[in-house]
C-alpha cells in the first residue's frame, strides 16, 4: 500500500529534522521522497511522527526468565510483544544469548509477536582464556568468535565479565584481571574488526578503557556508583565512545518477591534475574545523561523488561521534565532537560546504528517504513509528554498499519530475527571450544526451526 | 549398540549414517548414530537399553517392554476396537470431544513442542482442562521455587562444575540411564575432568537401588522419614541438632552437603510419593540455605522426554506452570493439583499412558461412568485398550520432525529420519481442531 502521513511533526534526528511539520510518503515497505497518488492518507495533525523504537537491551528472552512468571504474572511473550508495539517499538534486542542457550533464546524471540528481534552473544572469556594469552592466536580467536556469532545467529557480541576468573582455586593461576583482559580484547577488536558490548559493572569503569572504538558500554546504571566511575564513563563518551544508560527504573515495590532468582551460565557470577533496585539507582545515570550532550548515549533499562509502556515513561520524564525528578536529586543534577529530538536519537536513531540496522532509526528515503505516531500537540507541557509518548496512536511496521487509534489491528504482522553473517572460517579452536559441550556441534548451533524468520546481515 | 538386519532388506544395501537425538527420556541424548538402509534402521550406537526400545520397538530388549505398534485408526464398535478410516476416526473423536461439557486433555509430556502448542490451542477451543502427565511431580517443585527462590543451571554447567551430587528419591538408572555418564556422575566436565573421582555422590531412597553401587553415601529411609531427615540435616547445618533420635545418616548427609563447592540435588518421583509438597518445600529450603554460601541447584529429574517443553509452554502462554482449565465459569483457572476426574466427561490422551498411571479405583470409576477416551499413541497400551477412538501416530524424532526441551529447558530439533504412513500428534491435533 502507498501511504501519505500528513500534518505531523517529524522527529528524525538522523536528518536533523526536529519537529518540523512535514509529510511522509510510504511506498510498500519503504519510505520514499514523494508519492503522487497515495492509496491512503493518515492525518497526523497534533501528532509526533518518529521512527519505530528500538530497544537496545530488551531482556525478554533470557534463559531462566520464565521462572519470574512464578511470582508476578510476568506478561506472556504475546502480551510483551503487544506492549512493545503499543509503546511504538518495532525491534527488541535481547542482551543475553550464550553458546548453549542460543536455541532457547531464539525460540523465545520467535514467540514474541509484532516486533523484530535480535540478540547479543554473551561470551564466556573463561572458554577463550588460553587464546587470549597467546598473542599469536588473536587472528584465529577473532575468526572463531565471528564464527560463533554466525552459528548462534546473534547480531553482536557482549562481555558480561571482562576478566577471566575461576571458581576453582586450583585454576587461579589462569586468572586475567580486567585491565589486562580489556587491553587484549582491544587488540583483538581492532585487529579482527570486532566490537564488544561491555556490561558496565563498577569493576569495568575502574579499569582504564584503552580504546573507545572497541567497546560500547552497556547498561551503565549499575556501574555509576562513585564519582570516579561517572568520570570514566564521561571520558569514554567524550572521546567518541558510545554507551547505553541502563536505567534501574523499576520501583522496588513492583517486584513482588524478594527471593533470589539466579541462573548460572558458567560465568564467575550467576546472572541475577531479580536484582534489587536501589532507591537512588537512577541518579548516576541521570547525572551522566544530563552532563553529556553528545551523540553517543542510547536509552536502555537494566534488568528484565516487564512492561515498556509503564517502565520507560518515568525514565523519560526524569530526562525531559525537571519537575518530575525526585526533590532529593535537585542539587545533584544539572538543570538541563532532554528535547524530543534527543529522545528520538536515544531510543531510535542511535540504537539502530549500534545494531547495524542501516534502514531503521530514521525516516529518510530508502528507510524501512517503521513509523510511530504519538498524540502530542505542539504546546503540550513536558510534564505530559511521558503520558503521550507511552502509547502510540498509530504504528506502522514495514509500511503496514499495526496499531491504529491505539488498537492493535494487525496482530499477525510478519516479524524477523536479525543476525550477523560473518562469513568466518571454522578453525581448530572452534572444535576445541565444543569439546566440553554436552551437545554435538550440529545441535549446539541454532537450527532454522528454532527461530526466524531469519535475516542475515553482512 | 544394536545391530540387526531388518526383514525385507536383502543382499548388498546402501547404508546411510545419521546423527540422531534419542527421545527415550528427558536427557535427549544427541550423540547417537544410526545406520539406515531401505527406509529401515539397521543399527543405533551410544544408546542405552531404555532408549533402544524407542528405535526398535518390536524387539524384545526388556522383558516388560515389548510393544505392539498400532497399524490403523481404531474405533470401538459393539464394544470392540476395530479398524476404521482416518476420516471416520476424526469424526468420531470430534463428536466425543465436541459434545463433552468438561473435556480433559491429558498427558503431553511425551510428545513434541509443536504438538503441545496445538493441544493447548485445542484445549482453548474446547474449553477443556489440560493436565500434564507429571503434574504431581512438577507442581510441588514450582511451589517450592516460589517459596524459596531459584538457583538454576543448565546441565552443561552442572556437568562442568558440580562436585557434590545428591539423588533424592531418584534412580536415574531407570528413569534416564545415561544421565549419569553424560551429566551428573561419570561425565568428564571442564572442571570435573576425572569424572566420578572429581565428584562426591550420595543418594537418599526408600530402597537400596543400584545407585548405591557408585554412591559414596547411600541413605536408606523408611517411608515417612524423609521430612524428619531433611529437618535433621538443616539443624546440623545450622549447628544446632535437635534433641531426640535422628534418622540414620542425617549427620553424614549434612557433612556431605556442607563440603560442596557447587552442589546439585536431583530429585525424582520418589520425592513426591509421600507428602510431596512438604518434601519439596524442605528440599527447596535446604538448597536455598546451602546456596547462600555456594551455588546449589535443586533439579527435577524428569523422565518424560518433553516434560520441560510443556511447562515452558505453560509459562510462556499462561504465566503459570500448572494445569489450565479453560472451561471454568469464572474464566481461566489453573491448578497445581492433579484433577480427580470426577467431573470429566471425555478425555483426549496424547503423549502418555493415562491408565498406566491412574490408581486402579480411578481408572475403574472412569470406565464405570463410561467416560469416552480418545487416544493418540504409536503403540498399544492400557489407555488405547480403554479408548473409544485410537489414532496411530508417527514416532517423534524418528518418523516425525519436532522440537523438544531437554530436562534443563534447552530446546533441540528432532529430525524425521524414516518414512511413515502415520501422521504426527500435531497433525492429528490440528485436524481435530478443524473437525470439532
Ligand atoms: S538416557 Fe534417555 S535419551 Fe539418553 S539414550 Fe537413554 S533413553 Fe535415550
Image (spheres, coloured by chain):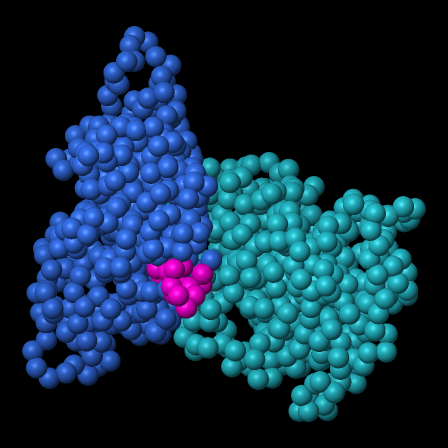
Query: A443 or B262: nearer the eye?
Result: A443
Q: Residue at x 65, y 59 (%)?
A: A408
Residue B361 picture location, percent across and down: 13, 55
Image quadrant for the C terminus of chain B?
top left
Q: Which residue is drawn at 31% across and 39% down?
A: B376
Residue B210 picture location, percent across and down: 13, 49
Query: A405 or A57: nearer the eye?
Result: A405
Q: Residue at x 91, y 48 (%)?
A: A34
Query: B209 or A70: nearer the eye?
Result: A70
| Residue B319 is inside the magenta segment | yes
- Residue B394 appears in which quarter of the rendering? top left
Q: Which chain is blue?
A: B
Q: The cyan chain is which one?
A: A
Q: Residue at x 17, y 61 (%)?
A: B273
Rendered view: B318 above or below B26: below
Give the magenta-colored segment's residue range: B318-333
Rendered view: B36 above or below B309: above
Image quadrant for the N terminus of chain B?
top left
- The answer, for residue A344, to whether it is visible in the render is yes
- Residue A330 appears in which quarter of the rendering? bottom right
Amino acid at each position: 500500500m502507498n501511504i501519505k502521513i500528513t500534518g505531523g511533526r517529524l522527529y528524525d534526528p538522523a536528518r536533523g529534522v526536529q519537529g518540523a511539520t512535514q509529510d511522509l510518503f510510504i511506498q510498500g515497505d519503504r519510505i520514499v521522497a514523494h508519492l503522487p497518488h497515495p492509496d491512503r492518507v493518515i492525518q497526523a495533525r497534533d501528532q509526533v511522527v518518529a521512527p519505530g523504537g528500538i530497544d537496545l537491551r530488551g531482556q525478554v528472552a533470557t534463559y531462566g526468565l520464565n521462572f519470574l512468571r512464578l511470582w508476578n504474572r510476568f506478561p506472556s511473550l504475546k502480551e510483551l510483544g503487544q506492549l512493545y508495539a503499543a509503546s511504538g517499538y518495532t525491534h527488541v534486542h535481547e542482551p543475553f544469548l550464550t553458546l548453549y542457550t542460543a536455541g532457547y533464546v531464539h525460540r523465545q524471540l520467535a514467540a514474541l509477536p509484532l516486533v523484530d528481534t535480535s540478540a547479543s552473544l554473551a561470551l564466556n572469556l573463561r572458554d577463550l582464556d588460553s587464546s587470549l594469552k597467546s598473542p599469536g592466536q588473536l587472528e584465529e580467536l577473532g575468526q572463531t568468535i565471528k564464527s560463533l556469532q554466525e552459528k548462534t545467529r546473534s547480531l553482536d557480541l557482549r562481555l558480561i565479565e571482562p576478566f577471566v576468573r575461576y571458581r576453582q582455586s586450583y585454576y587461579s593461576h589462569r586468572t586475567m584481571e580486567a585491565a589486562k583482559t580489556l587491553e587484549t580484547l582491544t587488540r583483538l577488536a581492532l585487529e579482527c574488526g570486532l566490537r564488544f558490548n561491555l556490561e558496565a559493572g563498577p569493576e569495568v569503569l575502574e579499569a582504564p578503557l584503552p580504546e573507545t572504538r572497541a567497546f560500547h558500554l552497556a547498561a551503565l546504571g549499575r556501574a555509576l556508583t562513585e564519582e570516579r566511575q561517572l568520570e570514566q564513563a564521561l571520558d569514554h563518551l567524550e572521546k567518541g565512545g558510545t554507551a547505553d544508560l541502563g536505567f534501574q527504573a523499576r520501583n522496588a515495590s513492583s517486584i513482588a518477591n524478594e527471593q533470589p532468582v539466579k541462573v548460572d551460565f558458567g560465568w564467575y557470577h550467576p546472572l541475577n534475574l531479580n536484582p534489587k533496585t536501589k532507591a537512588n539507582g537512577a541518579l548516576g545515570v541521570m547525572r551522566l545523561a544530563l552532563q553529556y550532550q553528545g551523540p553517543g548515549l542510547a536509552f536502555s533499562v537494566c534488568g528484565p523488561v516487564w512492561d515498556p509502556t509503564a517502565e520507560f515513561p518515568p525514565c523519560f520524564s526524569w530526562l525531559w521534565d525537571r519537575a518530575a525528578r525526585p526533590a532529593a536529586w535537585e542539587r545533584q543534577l544539572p538543570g538541563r532537560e532532554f528535547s524530543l529530538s534527543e529522545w528520538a536519537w536515544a531510543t531510535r536513531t542511535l540504537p539502530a546504528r549500534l545494531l547495524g540496522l542501516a534502514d531503521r532509526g530514521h525516516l529518510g528515503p530508502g528507510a524501512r517504513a517503521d513509523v510511530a505516531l504519538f498524540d502530542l500537540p505542539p504546546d503540550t507541557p513536558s510534564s505530559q509528554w511521558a503520558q503521550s509518548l507511552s502509547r502510540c496512536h498509530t504504528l506502522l511496521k514495514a509500511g503496514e498499519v499495526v496499531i491504529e487509534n491505539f488498537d492493535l489491528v494487525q496482530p499477525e504482522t510478519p516479524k524477523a530475527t536479525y543476525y550477523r553473517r560473518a562469513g568466518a572460517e571454522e578453525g581448530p579452536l572452534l572444535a576445541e571450544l565444543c569439546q566440553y559441550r554436552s551437545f554435538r556441534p550440529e545441535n549446539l548451533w541454532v537450527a532454522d526451526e528454532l527461530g526466524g524468520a531469519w535475516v542475515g546481515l553482512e | 549398540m544394536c545391530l540387526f538386519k531388518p526383514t525385507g532388506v536383502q543382499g548388498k544395501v546402501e547404508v546411510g549414517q545419521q546423527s540422531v537425538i534419542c527421545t527415550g527420556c528427558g536427557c535427549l541424548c544427541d550423540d547417537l548414530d544410526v545406520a539406515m538402509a531401505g527406509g529401515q534402521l539397521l543399527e543405533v550406537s551410544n544408546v542405552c537399553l531404555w532408549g533402544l526400545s524407542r528405535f526398535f520397538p518390536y524387539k524384545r530388549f526388556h522383558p516388560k517392554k515389548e510393544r505392539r505398534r498400532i497399524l490403523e485408526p481404531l474405533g470401538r464398535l459393539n464394544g470392540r476396537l476395530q479398524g476404521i478410516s482416518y476420516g471416520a476416526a476424526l469424526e468420531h473423536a470430534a463428536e466425543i470431544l465436541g459434545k463433552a461439557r468438561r473435556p480433559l486433555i491429558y498427558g503431553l509430556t511425551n510428545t513434541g513442542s509443536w504438538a503441545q502448542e496445538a493441544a493447548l490451542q485445542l484445549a482453548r477451543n474446547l474449553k477443556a482442562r489440560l493436565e500434564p502427565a507429571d503434574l504431581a511431580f512438577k507442581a510441588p517443585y514450582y511451589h517450592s521455587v516460589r517459596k524459596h527462590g531459584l538457583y538454576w543451571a543448565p546441565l552443561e554447567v552442572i556437568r562442568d562444575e558440580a562436585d557434590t551430587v545428591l539423588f533424592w528419591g531418584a534412580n536415574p538408572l531407570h528413569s534416564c540411564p545415561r544421565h549419569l555418564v553424560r551429566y551428573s556422575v561419570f561425565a568428564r566436565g571442564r572442571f570435573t575432568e576425572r569424572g566420578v573421582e572429581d565428584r562426591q555422590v550420595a543418594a537418599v531412597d526408600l530402597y537400596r537401588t543400584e545407585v548405591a553401587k557408585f554412591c559414596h553415601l547411600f541413605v536408606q529411609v523408611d517411608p515417612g522419614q524423609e521430612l524428619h531427615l531433611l529437618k535433621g540435616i538443616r539443624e546440623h547445618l545450622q549447628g544446632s541438632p535437635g534433641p531426640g533420635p535422628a534418622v540414620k545418616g542425617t549427620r553424614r548427609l549434612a557433612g556431605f552437603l556442607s563440603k560442596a563447592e557447587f552442589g546439585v540435588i536431583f530429585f525424582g518421583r520418589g520425592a513426591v510419593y509421600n507428602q510431596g509438597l512438604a518434601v519439596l518445600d524442605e528440599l527447596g529450603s535446604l538448597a536455598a540455605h546451602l546456596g547462600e554460601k555456594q551455588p546449589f541447584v535443586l533439579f527435577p529429574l524428569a523422565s518424560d522426554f518433553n516434560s520441560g517443553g510443556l511447562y515452558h509452554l505453560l509459562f510462556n502462554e499462561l504465566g503459570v506452570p500448572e494445569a489450565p482449565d479453560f472451561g471454568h465459569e469464572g474464566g481461566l483457572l489453573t491448578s497445581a493439583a492433579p484433577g480427580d476426574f470426577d467431573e470429566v466427561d471425555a478425555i483426549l490422551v496424547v503423549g502418555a499412558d493415562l491408565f498406566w498411571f491412574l490408581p486402579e479405583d480411578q481408572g475403574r470409576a472412569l470406565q464405570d461412568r463410561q467416560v469416552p477416551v480418545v487416544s493418540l499413541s504409536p503403540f498399544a497400551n492400557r489407555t488405547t485398550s480403554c479408548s473409544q477412538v485410537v489414532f496411530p501416530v508417527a514416532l517423534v524424532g524418528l518418523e516425525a520432525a519436532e522440537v523438544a526441551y531437554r530436562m534443563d529447558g534447552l530446546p533441540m530439533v528432532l529430525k524425521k529420519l524414516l518414512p511413515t504412513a502415520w501422521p504426527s500428534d500435531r497433525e492429528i491435533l490440528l485436524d481435530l481442531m478443524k473437525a470439532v
